[in-house]
Image: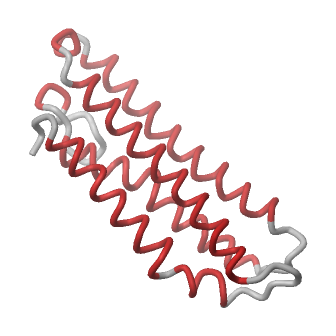
Amino acid sequence: MNKSPINYLLTAVIGALLWVVFAFFLASYLSENPSLAEKYPEELAAELRLIFGAGTLLSIISAAYWYYYGSQEKVAGELSAAKTKWRTMFFAQVLIAVALAFVIVIRNRNEGIESQWFVIYFLVLSVLTFTLFWLTTFLFSPRTVKFIPFGK
């Protein structure tokens, strides 16, 4: 499963499935239960779909770049640089999740949404960004760099 293009395809499929689950199957729960002052739940749902999709897409692109980078022959002699690159990419995903959650907070600060919902939105973004990146690179990294992701 760590052969190209299977790792790219499986990453895209897992990302798309997670996005569909959170953006469509749970959209009504995530947008209708918070109390809204001016927005309609459908508007909030559309906004969440867009932001969740952006996070998922950035995670998939980062994982695809990692597969490309890890499959190059020169990386075998530079595993410490590869480890630094993976960690940088992972923490970039954490920052992306924080930034996208901040966007949700800023865009909805006048809606009166309870703070617990912003925490839930951040947790969803966490699953769609750095958890997705970690899981896919943990499972599908090329042989040269397969022991670099956390947990191996």
The front one of 74 and 108 is 108
Q: Is residue 100 above or below residue 30?
A: above
Residue found 14% across the figure and 25% down from its top: 144
The front one of 85 and 21 is 21
Q: In this view, does 52 lie above or below 35?
A: above
Residue 137 is left or right of residue 18, and the answer is left
Q: In this view, does 19 lie above or below 57?
A: below
Query: Which quadrant of the rendered structure holds the N terminus?
Result: top left
Residue 19 is left or right of residue 46, and the answer is left
Residue 47 is left or right of residue 151, and the answer is right
- Residue 112 x %, y %: 85, 80
**Figure quadrant of residue 84:** top left
- Residue 48 x %, y %: 62, 67
Residue found 46% across the figure and 48% down from its top: 57
Residue 119 is left or right of residue 73, and the answer is right
Colouring mode (rainbow / by chain / secondary structure / one colour): secondary structure
- Residue 74 x %, y %: 20, 9
Residue found 44% across the figure and 50% down from its top: 130
The front one of 62 and 89 is 62
Residue found 35% across the figure and 30% down from its top: 65
Query: Which quadrant of the rendered structure holds the C terminus?
Result: top left
